[in-house]
Amino acid sequence: MNINLYIARRIFSARENRNSLSHRIVNIALFGIVLGLVVLILSVAIVTGYKSEVARKVIGFGSHLQIDNLDSNQSYETSPISQNQPFIQELKAIPGIRHIQIFATKPGIIRTNDEIQGVVLKGIGPDFDWSFFQENKVSGEPFLVQDTIRSNQVWVSKQMADLLKLKLGDDLTMFFIHESEAIPRQRKFQLAGIYKTSLEEFDRMFVLVDINHIRKLNNWRNDEVSGFEILVNDFNELPKEEKAVRDLLLRNTNADSPVLQVVSIKQKYRHIFDWLSLLDMNVWVILILMVMVAGFNMVSSLLVIILERTQMIGILKAMGARNWSIRNIFLYFSVLLILKALVWGNILGIGICLLQQYSHIMKLDPSSYFLDFVPIKLDVWHIVLLNVGTIVITIMMLLVPSYFITKVSPEKTIRFE
């Protein structure tokens, strides 16, 4: 039997001092730890969810990886490559790659009776994965892309539809400027679908259209595209997949074909992902502050308890107990208090996260935050690490005040009593 733990449990469950000053101070310390853990759980869950949701939406517009012509130079007016590349089957066989699809882009201008808007047409083929736009669909249905017949249907964002005063089924006219032509080319399309992602930078730019229109406008052959979009299974493994695709392209490079490049979504939209990375610093600042507050609360409460139990410490020393053994009693007592606080902190923190995850009570301004509600992503490992880290750091901070036990003199405390 661990006598130190037994004494600590008796002190922890003692009812005779419920109205004492130390009991009130301990309750304040418990409240501080509970509040700190709730803030930590919410901070990690919100930042993780926010980064994941924004990244998912950016990937929905541009995929994880793109293969295109090096001459395109990150421009939406691209140089074509053949979609019948010899490495396609090897590309599909790379572990971790989920889907490959062709695409083409071209800048254009939408004009209505009252408004004008510059856009980028994203040409899609029969192999296009509609899942992202279906998730963010406001109205309409996907249009069918065929090799022989061009579809005049397009999808635009709700923001663009509201700006141009368009509704489902309306016709819209687009103009395309060529350097070699004095008169812009004109095409008429029909609005078949409206989406909303709240990513204002993308919503006001991209229009989904049949890729055959871009081929016709650019005078491309029927097998030419801007490039390939690649979707992977695990975003965290993106550097590994990017290296595998780049190595494959190097093995299939020859002097007669265009030079191809691999561009990851992090590279293409570096400003967005660099900004998301900065959010981690906020979490670390909150984590350090909350753990320090919890630690100092426990330090102050332990000092008060040591002062209140001075007679007990003196008696234990008189009976032959060593200093480290007595320190263990108060450290065990502190651990019991911390565990009690962590239980309540986890219940409240996880409960608030689940409430927000399923009800979206807390809203955001989409124009500023790219989302219309506070996203939540609960990770079991994050919660475990937060709890373990709080216990370890707090106990380490309590080693200092427990040292004062060694300064207690048995004869003075017993004589004083």
Image (cartoon, rainbow, N blue to C red):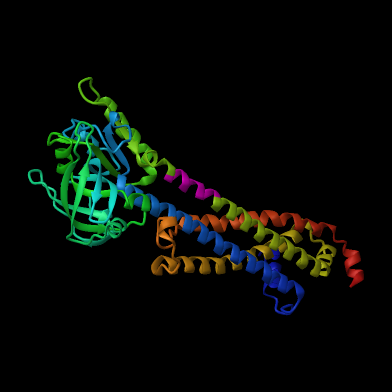
Name the outermost residue toward the top. 255
Residue that appears at 45% across and 67% down = 362
Note whether 226 is above or below 38 in the view shown. Answer: above
Residue 174, image x, y percentages? 21, 47
Residue 267 placement (x, y as % from top left) = 39, 38
- Tell me: residue 268, above or below residue 396: above
- Which residue is at the front of the view, 323 or 43? 43
Query: Does residue 93 appear in the picture of this structure?
Result: no
Q: 101 or 1, which is in the foreground?
A: 101
- Up-down relation of residue 79 to residue 191 (above or below): above
Where, quadrant-wise, is the C terminus in this rendering?
A: bottom right
Residue 185 vs residue 297: left or right? left
Majority secondary structure in the magenta region: helix
Side of 411 relative to 254 (left or right): right
Residue 349 placement (x, y as % from top left) = 51, 66
Residue closest to the eye, 279 or 311: 279
Q: Is residue 40 magenta?
A: no
Say whether residue 381 is left or right of residue 260: right
Q: Quadrant of residue 176?
A: top left
In terms of image quadrants, where is residue 165? bottom left
The segment highlighted magenta reads: 272-281
Quadrant in which the N terminus appears: bottom right
